[in-house]
């Protein structure tokens, strides 16, 4: 569970356990009847559960206390603003740092992989990261200084994230839902929230991480045994 940039969350807690189904909510998946509790509601219940559990309080939080906690944590933004080689990450109209995240447009399903933008009807845009578009003129070469090469590398990394093809297999919430063994995709098939790298809806793309963790643990155990 992140402690800043909560504006971009689609679920509360890494496994989504504080995000519940809520019939009648406005946060609904198009085409089906599944609706989720708003993130603000999930953060509120999480705060109360933490107060009763971790803090061992003798009473639940009041509604006003919950609102104050959610308001405070929802207003926290962090992002890297300085790079040892590239320098200031807001230079030359780049959008590194927390201020850009504060101003970034976001609402429920702004860029759904299948349905696009629920509000405007615009099709899905796989180009999720655009913070460093203004640095696209930087090209590495042997005579370039370290700042130029570093900024060129950042632009290449952004392009890689937006376009690198991957073959998605054995991932719950993707291959089973689509009934396809291998789904051609890119990083932004799951990480589809503009400039924040999160997943827009409470789906199970987190199972990619769980699957990878399982494979790593399995290999470690295999090495220890043998």
Image: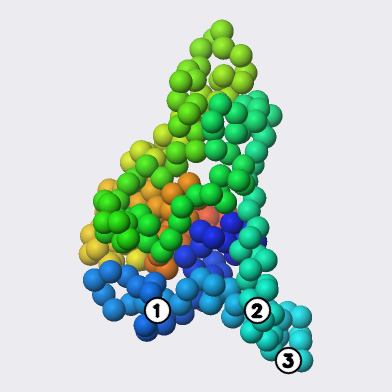
Disc on res. 59: 3
**Closer to the observer: label 1 or label 3?**
1
What is the CA distance from the residue labelled 1 to the residue labelled 3? 28 Å
Q: Nearer the viewer, residue 204 or 225?
A: 204
What is the CA distance from the residue labelled 3 to the residue labelled 2? 13 Å
Q: Residue at x 56, y 20 (%)?
A: 149
Which residue carries the number 1 mark?
A: 25
Q: Residues within 10 Å of mark 1 (few under 14, many from 20)?
A: few
Q: Quadrant of residue 42?
A: bottom right
Rendered location of residue 178, percent (x, y): 24, 63
Q: Residues within 10 Å of mark 2 (few under 14, many from 20)?
A: many
Q: Circle 1 sits in a helix, a strand or a loop, which is it?
A: loop
Q: Nearer the viewer, residue 220 or 25?
A: 25
**Closer to the observer: label 3 or label 2?**
2
Q: Residue at x 40, y 52 (%)?
A: 192
Query: Relative to 14, is 30 on the left or the right?
Result: left
Q: Nearer the viewer, residue 127 or 161?
A: 127
Rendered location of residue 181, percent (x, y): 25, 58
* Quadrant for the C terminus in the image: bottom right
What is the CA distance from the residue labelled 1 to the residue labelled 2? 20 Å
Q: Earlier in the sequence, mark 3 or mark 2?
A: 3
Disc on res. 225: none
Which residue carries the number 2 mark?
A: 66
Q: Earlier in the sequence, mark 1 or mark 2?
A: 1
Residue 61 sits above or below residue 105 on the image = below
């Amino acid at each position: 569970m992140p402690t800043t940039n909560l504006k971009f969350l689609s679920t509360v807690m890494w496994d989504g356990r504080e995000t519940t189904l809520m019939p009648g909510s406005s946060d609904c998946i198009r085409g089906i009847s599944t609706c989720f509790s708003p993130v603000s509601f999930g953060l509120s219940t999480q705060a109360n559960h933490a107060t009763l559990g971790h803090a061992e309080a003798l009473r639940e939080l009041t509604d006003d206390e919950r609102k104050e906690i959610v308001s405070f944590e929802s207003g926290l933004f962090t992002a890297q603003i300085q790079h040892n080689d590239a320098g200031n990450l807001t230079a030359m109209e780049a959008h590194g740092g927390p201020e850009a995240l504060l101003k970034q447009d976001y609402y429920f399903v702004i860029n759904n992989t299948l349905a696009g933008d629920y509000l405007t009807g615009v099709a899905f845009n796989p180009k999720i990261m655009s913070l460093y578009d203004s640095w696209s003129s930087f090209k590495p070469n042997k005579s370039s200084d370290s700042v130029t090469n570093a900024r060129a590398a950042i632009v290449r990394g952004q392009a890689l994230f937006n376009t690198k093809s991957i073959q998605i297999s054995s991932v719950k919430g993707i291959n089973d839902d689509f009934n396809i063994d291998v789904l051609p995709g890119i990083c932004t098939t799951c990480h589809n929230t503009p400039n924040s790298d999160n997943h827009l809806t409470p789906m199970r793309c987190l199972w990619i991480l769980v699957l990878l963790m399982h494979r790593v643990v399995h290999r470690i155990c295999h090495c220890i045994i043998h």
